[in-house]
Image: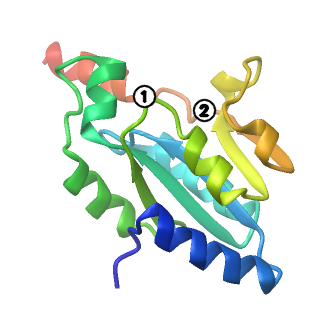
Amino acid sequence: MSKTKTLSTLQGIVSRLKKHGKRIVFTNGCFDLLHPGHIKILKTAKEKGDILIVGLNADTSIKRLKGNARPIIDEKARICLLEAIEYVDYIVLFEEDTPLHLIKALRPYCLVKGEDWHNHNVVGQEFVKKVCFVKFYPGYSTTKIIEKIKHV
């Protein structure tokens, strides 16, 4: 069974889970060129609650945010990779630049972001009880990987 759901389907699932006392955790990102830093965020996010939902930027969203050369891995392949990760319970794809509408609709218990967001206004923080930040896995970022490949 696919972990990837539409927002409307996921809203029903989340509503039932909350009625059973489950704590919903949400994180989001492009997850392009999956690396140990991504895994650390997903593992840490899962530890913050019972159910982890990943908001995944669609290809069109990534192109707007990062330029026409991105994503490196298309959304179908990125979904396939995320579905294989045990920490991830559900995935929801979004076309917008931010996951605000997802967070507002799902109202998770906790929102998990990378440490680079620590001194910023986190999108959707007003719709969650808790915001947690994850320290980066040293030496890994998609941008650094792309630069390394360019110089090989």
Residue assigned mark 1: 141
Q: Regarding mark 1 in the picture, which secondary structure is present there?
A: loop
Judge whether 138 appears above or below 48 on screen.
Answer: above
Q: Quadrant of residue 107?
A: bottom right
Q: Which residue is mark 2?
A: 136
Q: Residue at x 51, y 55 (%)?
A: 54
Disc 2 marks which amino acid?
A: Phe
39 lies left or right of 58? right
Instruction: Name the quadrant containing residue 79.
Output: bottom left
Residue placed furthest toward the right: 129
Q: Is residue 20 left or right of residue 11?
A: right
Gap between marks 2 and 1, in whole Å? Answer: 9 Å
Tell me: 127 left or right of 32. Answer: right
Can the viewer see residue 89?
Answer: no
The percent coordinates of residue 91 (x first, y second) are: 45, 62
Residue 71 point in image, percent of width and height? 23, 33
* Marks 2 & 1, CB-CB < 8 Å contact: yes
Q: Residue at x 50, y 40 (%)?
A: 37
Relative to 105, is 63 above or below?
above
Q: Residue furthest top?
A: 151
Q: Observer-nearest residue: 35 or 13? A: 13
In front here: 37 or 104? 104
